[in-house]
Amino acid sequence: MRTRTTTLPFLVAAAVVAVGSLTPAADIPNDRAAVEHAVSRLTFGARPGDVERVQQAGLARWIETQLASGQDAVLAARLPALPEKPSTVDSPQDARRYGREAVQALAAAKIIRAVHSERQLEELLVDFWFNHFNVFAGKGRTALYIPEYERDAIRPHVFGTFRTMLGATAKSPAMLFYLDNWLSTDPNSATARRNPDGRRNGLNENYARELLELHTLGVDGGYTQDDIINAARAFTGWTIERPQQDTAFQAGTGFRFAPALHDHGEKTILGQRFPAHAVNPRQRRPPQGGIDEGERVLDIVAAHPSTAKHIATKLARRFVSDEPPAGLVDRVAARFTETKGDLRETVRAVITSPEFFAENARRTKVKTPLEFVASAMRASGREVIDARPLLRGLEQLGMAPYRAEPPTGYDDTAETWISAGALVARMNLARQLTPDQAARIGGPDFQRR
């Protein structure tokens, strides 16, 4: 792997935001230990000189710069081009080839962004939210839709509102295909799609279950099996354009609501009644509405108190500790609720909290393999010229991008990533990445942030 030692100045991002709009939070320390902690926790790792530059500029202001919206124009020139999506694909082999090439290019872009982006907090949050709303590239046609999924459903919303991101993921073909909602229909519909064996597709609960258990309320969020079933009924007819063409797709293929496949009967979800849609007695056809039911479910769960606590817990676990303090979770959940799910303000509540800067929170989080590899590159000041060796390293460490099979995505706690075998694998990879710094890179301190 060829390398160069030049690095970009850490305040490139400041050039693309309205600096006058930055309002640093009060009571943020600026001593070296606090700066080292913040730079380690809010980036993929410090580069040579980063701590000194952040301390000189002021940690509070740097945090606000990272929370501000902007673009990293210099980074764009580094990113590999995604393969062009053809207007049609003539065979399953062609579809798999395109999907494989697209995911490989996106994975290379992910590691390049992690190493070189000046929008480090944004990249951490893109990774966080992709895992929260995980889709698996290895399932069928899902890989075809993943580039647009990250670009359109995740990345634009990490500093937006939770409800907007939730809706974007719900309507993404990647999510619809991965969790099979594109096949979910009212089994009594006369036009219900049929399987190859001639049987009608019926209700599929996969998306509704993960929506309540993982995406919003959490496993202890107070829902029942009946809520899952009725939520699944509310999302019947949420499908993909031209779903009958299993081996072909068109450019721009996306979400489609099919009223004829929707269950128009009465439902009760989380204590709220959804009235039945009236059928035209003359035409004896189902009504044309129904998409509003799925939207209403998303509104309900996005505003639910259990969702606020679930999201607050996950963000606090990601940025503070594997077992986040209850008081912090409560305050962050309150901030989520009072801002109607404003994710920028929710993240701000976590990373400017006293618990974030507390001494017992420092060097306690074990780096994921992605963070380990990216931080090794950043610490050595090297540039990513060829991402393939790094991606092979991530695969060896068990964190190949976009390849987490379960809906939970990749975990963020120590017990997942630390074992005797995992530490040996990290040390071996560290020697490959930075042979002149093997002892320091492979040492135990380098495992933590």
Image: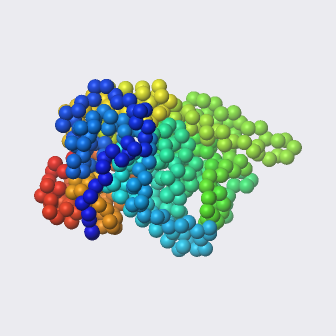
Q: Nearer the viewer, residue 428 or 288?
A: 428
* Residue beneath the point at 80% across and 47% down: 285
Q: Nearer the viewer, residue 169 or 196?
A: 169
* Residue beneath the point at 72% across and 50% down: 260
Does residue 360 appear in the picture of this structure? no
* Residue beneath the point at 30% across and 49% down: 9
Image location of residue 413, percent across then percent down? 29, 45
Q: Name which quarter of the figure residue 321 lies in.
A: top left
Q: Is residue 326 above or below residue 425?
A: above
Q: Is residue 154 above or below residue 319?
A: below
Q: Nearer the viewer, residue 382 or 320?
A: 382
Q: Is residue 423 left or right of residue 313?
A: left
Which residue lies most toward the left here?
439
Image location of residue 54, percent across then percent down? 26, 40
Image location of residue 352, percent across then percent down? 32, 31
Image location of residue 59, percent across then percent down? 28, 35
